[in-house]
Image (spheres, helix red, strand yellow):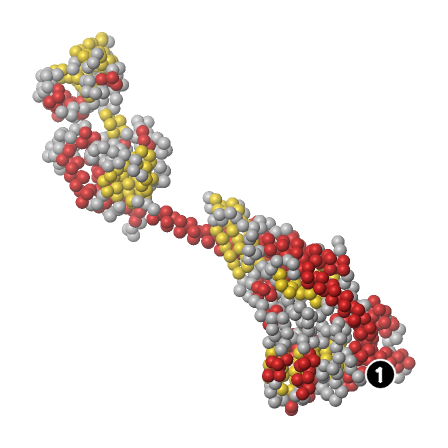
Amino acid sequence: MKQVYIDYGSASPVDPRVLEAMMPYFKTDVGNPSSLHSSGRKARRELENARGLVAKLVGAPNPKSITFTSCATESNNLALRGAAMRYKDKGNHIITTSIEHMSVINPLKDLQRNGFEVTQIPVDKDGLVDPEKIKNAITEKTMLISVMYANGEVGTVQPVKEIGEIASDKKILFHVDGTAACGKVPLNVENEHIDLLTISSNDMLGPKGVGALYVKQAVRLMPFMLGGGQEFGMRSGSENIPGIIGMGKAAEIAANEMVDEGARMIRLRDRLIDSILKTEYTYLTGHRTKRLPNNASFRFSFIEGESIILQLNDLGITASTGSACSSKTLEPSHVLIAMGLRHEEAHGSLLLTLGRQSTDEDADHVIDSVPKIVAKLRALSPLYPRK
Amino acid sequence: MNEQFEYSEKVMEHFRNPRNVGEIKDADGIGRVGNPVCGDLMEIQIKVENNILKDVKFKTFGCGSAIATSSMVTEMAKGKTLEEALKITRGDVADELGGLPPIKMHCSNLAADALHAAIKDYMAKKEEKSKLEAEKYDFDVIVVGGGPGGLTTGILCAYRGLKTAIFEASNWGGILSWLCPTKMIENFPGICEKTTCLDLVEQWVNEAKKLKVELKKERVNEITQDKKIITDSGEYRGKTLVLATGSSPSSAGVKGEEKFSKDDRGVYYYVRNPQNYAGKRVLIVGGGNSAVDAALSLADTADLITVAHRKDELRAVAQKVERLKAIDKIKVLYNTEVLEIAGTEKVEKVIMRDLKEAETIQQVVDSVVLAVGLTPNTEIFKKLGLETDEKGYIKTDKTQKTNIDGIYAVGDIASDLQLVVVAVAHGATVAHNAYIELRKPYWR
């Protein structure tokens, strides 16, 4: 049976070129970049090279503004808690949106428990944030604005530049969670007035276990990982050299191939969207055009997401859902709820995320299978109107 | 965490190939159970026959385990009695599936609840239906037959406050009003020799009217097991049915009986008006009270009266026999059997046989009265499936109940004593028991 992996948003395979670049640093070139011997100096050179590649990907003029972390979650934590704690004298008000990742929501909740006020700006039915609403929410105590670049679940890309300009005007720190976006859409921290940017490695086909945070020059953060003072003192701990080199390579490939690869994925994505939307009672989630190139997400009335995933799995297709039934907390996706869907509507969601290895044949198989599964499950559903 | 999400092979098997999916046409019960948190929805439909789940079908909006538990519960419930099915728990369903991930135990394991809801829906509908059925009854008690047993049963039921109707095809009072209307009542303590049969019937009818018994002059053509009677004008349903169709004079089965018993040609079964026999030679057949009564009633009018009896002794009560013996005009032929009634247009003679002497006797007569007894009118009940004894009387228990639930029998069809006083006693017994069955009083 044909196997189709179309769940890149959950986890991605490492690009073979990335893996190749990493291999020596597991086996032979194992020196610590803090060491003075040649192996150590080589590691240092490669570490700084990777830093430069990541900086280049996001348009950061100075490579030193990139701090490597262990994952995007750590980067979000470091950005939010580090900035809040460092600049709490400037104010205690933080503005965010209702569709952020848990690694933004939960650190902010923790800050709320510690005296900060957090305003969540709602989104429209397409998952878009209105910059005006952010502007209106700003008070003299606002010291940080955190908005994701693009939502991995529904693919909607936010008007980051407009929000950045507002933040910049008001001299408020602007954090952007770029996890789902970096490496997929052109992104420039300078143009978009971003002060802090979370960057994921695995989302751009680099290895897991590494991430990065862009911190604008002159912005200081309160570190919470204390130790040997690595990464400019912002994140102590011996550097994950193979991981960082892999992330650097992934960033390099992404920067070089983004235009062509982006166009290829948009074509595949639109094939999926156009075909699957032909099924009755089927709706796209997220914005139709302001959308990640690799994201095709839907909801089907009268059926449930976990059932869809299990049925697709039986046909060799690996995908995701925002259904409550598939979550550990049995809560439906807060993103879909924030977009105004009722619980039972969020119930029937299907998330398809493409990647570099996705092909037209993959799309064909999905386009062929989804309507069959939907029909099969609807035949079981007491809600589906009988003809 | 991983193993908490893992489904057993059995769960996956039911998820992939769910059993009994769909809807049942004209389902007897539907159960819908939803989970307000996640929106899961299960619907189970059932078909019930003789308290057994003949068919169970489901439709489910929900996750893998929601579908698998629904499928499994339909398999578990099919063929079970309602009581057994109500005992199936969520835990039983999960066990049967080889277990469910702990996190799924509560949210998606609603199939047993849906099944129970469907059964309860069925039960509620059934109750509603039987309530509607109950409201469709026309009367608490329907009495078929307006003779002594029927009239008195109706009076005593109405006295108890039961809504009662009596159906009679011909005359109120039955045999009393057409066989012996002018006869004085005998053998009924308190009113013996004080009132005629017709007077007593009239009193009964008046009492019944006073107690608002519906007296319906309609012939009952059919009686069904569910206590419905069909008359020419329509159908009536009673919660209790009392059969009181009484008895008729028996046929003697003699040659010529059929020919001469029609159109006043000389053969009769009773003496209705003694004046009609003035100056006639009459043969009375039989030896019981009715034969002797007939002979005595003709003593003043008939010319010659002969009583032919098969036995060597009369069966009638002693005082009547003595009165009979004292009248010269009446001759009794013992051990004599009537063989034939003969004549051209009208009866002219009877041919008899002396059983003792083995001789054939011919006697010239003008009229023959066949007083050979009474036969219960139970023909109409053959189709109904009522049990009768070898003589044709309907079998009852001591409460006058027949073998069919809710159907009673009183009077001559249920007793070979064939006495008015017995019929009245039957009426009292039925009124008491019907009241207990229908009203379920605290004292019982």
What is the residue that sits farthest to the bottom in this orientation? A89
Q: Up-down: is B211 above or below A286?
A: above
How many marks the image carries: the answer is: 1
Kindly identify the residue that appears in the image at 18 percent across and 22 percent down.
B291
Report x, y in % for residue A63.
80, 83
Q: Residue B366 appears in which quarter of the rendering?
A: top left
Q: Up-down: is A69 above or below A310?
A: below
Nearer to the camera, B312 or B438: B438
The residue singled out by tag 1 in the image is A34
Query: Does residue B306 show up?
Result: no
Q: Residue A362 appears in which quarter of the rendering?
A: bottom right
Mark 1 Cα-neighbour bin, 10 Å: few <14, some 14–19, many ≥20 = some
Q: Using residue B344 as the reference point, say whether residue B77 is left or right of it.
A: right
Nearer to the camera, B99 or B319: B99
Report x, y in % for residue B64.
62, 58
Query: Does residue B75 show up?
Result: yes
Kindly identify the residue that appears in the image at 37 percent across and 50 percent down.
B131
Q: Residue B427 appears in which quarter of the rendering?
A: top left
Subunit of label 1: A
What is the residue that sits farthest to the right in this orientation? A38
Q: Up-down: is A108 above or below B379?
A: below
Report x, y in % for residue B106.
56, 62
Question: Element under label 1?
Answer: loop
Kindly identify the residue that appears in the image at 80 percent across and 79 percent down.
A56
Kindly identify the residue that appears in the image at 30 percent across and 35 percent down.
B232
Name the kind of residue labelled 1 in the image: Ser
